[in-house]
Image (tube, rainbow, N blue to C red):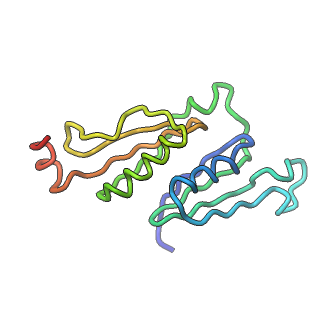
Amino acid sequence: MATSLVVYISFAGAAREAMTFYQSVFGGELTINTFSDFGIPDAPADGVMHSELRAEGFTVMGADGFDEPAQGWGASRTHAAFMSDEFDRVRGFYDRFVERGAEVKQPLEKQVWGDFYGEVVDPWGVAWMFNVAAPGGWAEGAATD
C-alpha cells in the first residue's frame, strides 16, 4: 500500500450529519459503521464508530468516539487544506461549503503570492483551506491581477 494522509475528524454525536454534509460538498462514496455494527457495549447503538468518505483523490474519515472539548470544537488548530491546480473543482468545493452555511473566513480570491486562496469554517468548527495555483506558477500569477 502506498503512503497517504487522510483527514480524520472527531465529533461528539454529529458524525453522521457532518459526513453526510461532506458528501454533499465533495461527492464520493460514504460508508458509515455504528457502534452496534461492531457489538460495542456502553456506546450509543446508532453512534458512528467509523465513517469514510472516498472522493476522487482524497478521503475524509470521522467518528463519534470522542467527547467535545471543554473549549468547544471551534478551538481546534487543525485545518484541512486543498492544494490544487484544478480551479473549477476546488472552487466548486468552496462554493458548496458556503451555500450550505459554512462561515467564510477568507473569500476565495487571488492573493499576493499569485495563487487563489480561501478559507471556510464548517458548522462543526472544522476549518477548510483552499489554495489553487495560478496558471504558470507564482511568478506569472504575481505579475498579473
Residue farthest along the front direction in this orientation: 99
Q: Measured from the top left, where is residue 68 in percent x and y?
A: 70, 34
In the picture as drawn, the residue positioned furthest to the bottom comes out as 1
Image position of 88 with respect to 131: above or below: below
Which residue is pictured at 15% across the width and 47% down the height? 141
Q: Out of 99 and 135, give the one closest to the viewer.
A: 99
Q: Is residue 121 left or right of residue 88?
A: right
Q: Which residue is depicted at the point 34% across and 56% down?
A: 88
Compared to 37, does 91 lie above or below? above
Q: Where is residue 30 in the image (x, y as percent from the top left)?
A: 63, 62
Q: In which quarter of the image is the C terminus?
A: top left
Locate residue 46, reporting x and y percent.
82, 52
Give the total of numbered labels: 0
Left or right: residue 86 versus residue 15 is: left
**Front residue of this view, candidates 3 and 7:** 7
Q: x, y percentage for residue 19?
A: 63, 52
Point out the residue furthest to the right here.
41
Q: Residue at x 62, y 60 (%)?
A: 52
Q: Residue at x 21, y 51 (%)?
A: 134
Question: Is residue 5 toward the left or the right of residue 134 in the image?
Answer: right
Place residue 50 in its image quadrant. Answer: bottom right
Q: In this view, does 6 lie above or below 2?
A: above
Task: Determine the residue located farthest toward the left in the rendered image.
Answer: 143
